[in-house]
Structure formats: C-alpha cells, structure tokens
Amino acid sequence: MGIGWTTHNGLWHRPPQQDFQSLSIPRVSREPLYLAMAQSFAGQVAIITGGAQGIGYGIAEYLGARGAAICIVDMDGAKNDAAVASLGAKGVSASHAVCDVSNAEHWKAALAQFLGAHGHIEILVQAAGVTGRTGINTEEVDPDNFDFVLRVNARGIFLGCKTVLPVMKAAGYGRILNIASVAGKDGNAGMVAYSASKGAVIAMTKAIGKEYAETGVTCNALAPAVVRTAMVDAMPEQQVKYMTGALRAPRGGAPRCRKNRRCFTHAQLPADKIPMKRCGTISEIAALTAFAVSKECSFTTGFTFDATGGRCVGVFHGPASLCSARRHAKPPIPNLAPPPPHTHTRSATY
Ligand SMILES: NC(=O)c1ccc[n+]([C@@H]2O[C@H](COP(=O)([O-])OP(=O)(O)OC[C@H]3O[C@@H](n4cnc5c(N)ncnc54)[C@H](O)[C@@H]3O)[C@@H](O)[C@H]2O)c1
C-alpha cells in the first residue's frame, strides 16, 4: 500500500491529493522525449499495405507525422490517390502503388517502384485484409470464399514479407509488423475463414521472427479487437454484436454475481468480450504500431502485440475487490491504487 493510505470501516481510502504532490519524485521534462519521438522515423521509408483507408491509413498518418516517407500499397488507384493527397496536405511525404497483395508480380513491381524512388526500406506494416462473408457457421461457408480470405490475409502477408525481407536483410535492419486479429487467437464464431487466416498470420510471424532473429530484422504481429472502420461497418450487425460483447443473456436477465445478487459487474457475462467495454481506436493501434516498428523495439520478434481492451488476458470476471458490498470488499493489492468506485449498473456497450 502506498504512503498515506488509511482504512476506515474496512475500506481503504486514498490520501488527499496534496500528499502525492509533496512526495519527492524527481520530475523529468517530457519535451525532449516528445521531440525525440516526433523525429524517430525521419529518414526511414515505410511500406504500408491497406494504407488507403482505415487502420492502414491511420498508421500511415501516424508514422508520416513522425518523419517516415510513406509508400501505400492498396488495390484501388483512385482511393490510393486520395490517401496520398490527404497525407500530403498534412505535410507527409507519400506515394503509392496499386497492388493486390496476394499477387507476387504486383509485389515485385511495387518494390521496384519504391526502391527506385527511395533506395531503401526500413519498415513494412501489413494492414491489407478482408473478412469474406461473416455471420455464418462453418457448414455454410463457400469454399471459394474461404480461399479468397486466406489468399488475401495469409498469402498476402507471406508475399509482403518474402518481398521485403531480402532488402532488409541486406541492410542489416528492418521492422515488419503484420496486422493480425484477436480472431486469430480466440477464433470468432461466424468468421471461420477470417479466424483461420489471422491464426496463420500469427504463426507465420513467429516463424519469420525466428528465421531472421540474427539479421537485425524483426517481425512482429498486432492483434486488435474491434476498431470501428469500414470493414466492421460492412459486417452483419449480429456479428459485430458478437465481437464486441453487446449481446446479453437473452432470457432471464444477465447472470449476476454469485456473492451479491444485485451486482452485475462481477458476473461472467457470456458475451462480455471487451473488458474495457469499448472498441479500440485507430490512433491506439497506430501508436502501438509505431512502437513495434521503432528502433527502440529491438529485442522483440515473433511476438503478437495485444490491442484488445483486455479481451486476451483471460475470462473476465471483474476483480472481486470492485464490489462495494462490505462483506465482499477486499483490501486493495499493496502498492497499487484501488480501482474507481463501483456502482451496480452496467455501462453502455457497443
Ligand atoms: N477493424 C477491426 O475491427 C479490425 C480488428 C482486428 C484486425 N483488423 C485488421 O486490420 C487490418 C485493417 O482493417 P481495417 O478495419 O482498416 O479494414 P478496411 O477495410 O477499412 O481497410 C482494409 C484495406 O485493405 C485493402 N485491401 C483489401 N484487400 C486487398 C488486397 N488484396 N490487396 C491490397 N489491398 C487490399 C482495402 O482496399 C482497404 O483499403 C485488416 O487486416 C483487418 O483484418 C481489423
């Protein structure tokens, strides 16, 4: 327990704010760190697949704002032009190649174009992806649709890595980040092809991470939970509700805490998918990506970063110490601030 914590009637109380201010914690100016981060991609070239919109575009904007020259790889020339113009208007140096990531010849042409323009490539972020048809069980899935999803999401990532790895290996430096999904770890019902393809991305990333571990090239993945983009908007509503956890027990009300019948927060709701009770944002994914492809992220490879609002930390029950019912209240864990006060109402979900 931190300095100044007191108990009263079995509950722990935070010390008044001035107690914290009086603690002699050395203060470090944030400005030099901020400026260093703002310039951390200066001189680097980043290829970003799926960069014409959504998460890929957000990552392009984030890295570009920090000095990287952005090379967008996406399918539609008009959309690519619009993305490049929009980045340019924000002062980002950007170009694009029209490329189907599942096509090896397209990749060769894109690489030649970018190397011709810049002469080097430090970063590859692979965000191009498709869901295929969703909201249906495996027996209803068209094998052609399954192949299509695997082709773009798995073969596309493989080809992207295969294309840039020789360049990065020769330079003795490279950062690859493959956008997977929590579906690749957990498996999303109604999305068998997508889940399989993202599982493949995670496994591929592990294999590549090991293969190139001694070359100065790292290869990691990032597994987001739901981020509201055009991809999610195009899914059937029931599928989105399933992924976010908006579904509640349909009959008889939501299950309740076994210790306190009035408490819903501690109950294990069957569809309580995101403990933070919200979707992720593009800028949160972009910020994590920026770290994963930075020079500073130098001792991590083959790893899948989590961006799931806690979904992947295990089954969420809610810590019992949140319950304000006196006989269930536990003292907070020593040296950690207690959670905010708990009310017995559920917050709005997506
Ligand atoms: N949005 C989410 O909730 C979420 C969650 C987890 C993972 N992801 C993953 O993040 C990535 C980006 O998703 P998003 O939500 O921004 O989707 P999005 O549909 O908004 O963007 C995907 C982009 O990929 C491009 N693309 C699709 N097929 C392509 C191909 N064959 N070749 C080249 N480009 C192609 C599209 O043109 C589009 O610009 C995807 O890999 C997706 O699976 C998204």
Image (cartoon, rainbow, N blue to C red):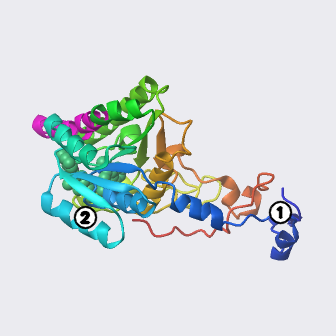
User: In the displayed structure, would residue 130 be above or below residue 276?
Assistant: above
Residue 269: percent from the left, percent from the top? Answer: 48, 53
Q: Is residue 117 visible?
A: yes
Q: How far apart are labels 2 and 1 at the CA level?
A: 45 Å
Percent across and percent down for residue 106 are 15, 41
Q: Type of residue at label 1?
A: Ile
Question: Per the image, is 160 magenta?
Answer: yes
> Could you say where residue 76 lies in the image, as x and y percent from the top left?
14, 56
Q: Is residue 127 magenta?
A: no
Q: Quadrant of residue 96?
A: bottom left
User: Could you tell me residue 279's position as x and y percent?
Assistant: 42, 61
The verdict on label 2 being within 8 Å of ligand 1 is no
Q: Which residues are magenta?
A: 134-161
Q: Residue at x 30, y 68 (%)?
A: 88
Q: Toward which corner of the image does residue 196 lie, by quadrant?
A: top left
Of residue 192 and residue 87, the one placed in the foreground of this image is 87
Which residue is identified by label 2?
Answer: 83
State the quadrant of the N terminus: bottom right
Q: Mark 1 = which residue? A: 25
Tag 2: Cα neighbours inside 10 Å, few (<14), some, or many (≥20)?
Answer: many
Whether residue 227 is visible here, answered yes or no, is: no
Type of amino acid at the residue the image marks with label 2: Ala
User: From the viewer's perspective, is 148 left or right of 169?
Assistant: left
* Residue drawn where x is 19% and y is 51% of the image: 97
